[in-house]
Amino acid sequence: MQMGLVPSVPVPRHAFPHLFFALLAFTILAPLATGSQVQRLVYLALSLLVLIAGIRLSWFVPKTRLALLVLAVPAIVASALGASHARSPVEAFLLVFTASFFILMTVRLLHKIVHDTVVTADTLYGAASIYLFIGITFALVYYIISHLQPGAFYVNATRSADLIGGWPSYVYFSFVTLSTVGYGDITPATQLVRSVVILQVVTGVFYVAVLIGRLVDLYRPSTK
């Protein structure tokens, strides 16, 4: 058996839509992670839901399942620290494991959808999940860089301390970058961040143009 999600490997029922909607809620509600204690707890619950959905999707692939379980432990600790507003180097270090979790899921999903001979609704849910994984993973990268390079971002706002808090605050910047909207309220201030921004823009544009376009072209709705 190959490691990864391939067409011959069974997955739990509705695993793909469950992962997609968990990621969508996680992304949309990211600003809540810097709000009240109740809001932060809600976001912590969403973080756990995303991790569970990812592990569930790969449950029938032992090697991938084991790797995800190992990465999920420090990811949970990092989420708990974030919910307590404990911005510290320890949290940034643990978030490396969270980013690794998302990268592994991205690779496995990509491996699956490019090998699918029949493009189904699950394939499209997987492709959409990859797009969300890209945005979330780059948000983690930006947050880690902000610890390594203080002042790596310029915030054009009077309440800058409230605008940039824990790592979910960077989800906003990441998706604004990924969609090439560029509001200008948060901008990169160092060469390293600018390079990462360019990488994210190129990744997002090529992903949508090449992979999503191909899948939409091959998709055949079920006649049942």
Image (cartoon, rainbow, N blue to C red):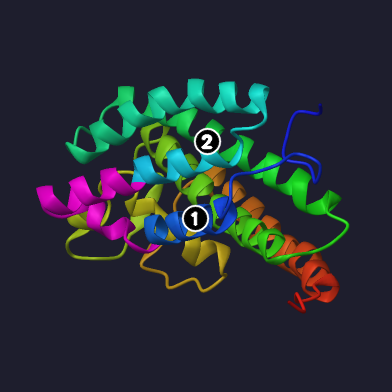
Image location (x, y in percent) of residue 65:
59, 27
Give the label on residue 18, or none: 1
Pick whichever, 87 or 6, lies toward us: 6
Pick whichever, 120 or 171, lies toward us: 120
Image location (x, y in percent) of residue 26:
38, 55
- Tell me what residue is drawn at x 17 percent, y 54 percent: 39
In the rendered image, which residue does mark 2 sit on? 55
- Tell me what residue is drawn at x 54 percent, y 59 percent: 17
Q: Is residue 166 above or below residue 93?
A: below
Is residue 84 shown left or right of residue 138?
left
Where does the magenta region start and end? Answer: 28-46
Question: Element type at marker 1?
Answer: helix
How far apart marks 1 and 2 lie (CA) works out to 12 Å
Q: Quadrant of residue 103?
A: top right
Pick whichever, 173 or 221, lies toward us: 221
Image location (x, y in percent) of residue 158:
18, 65
What residue occupies the far front of the structure in this picture? Answer: 224
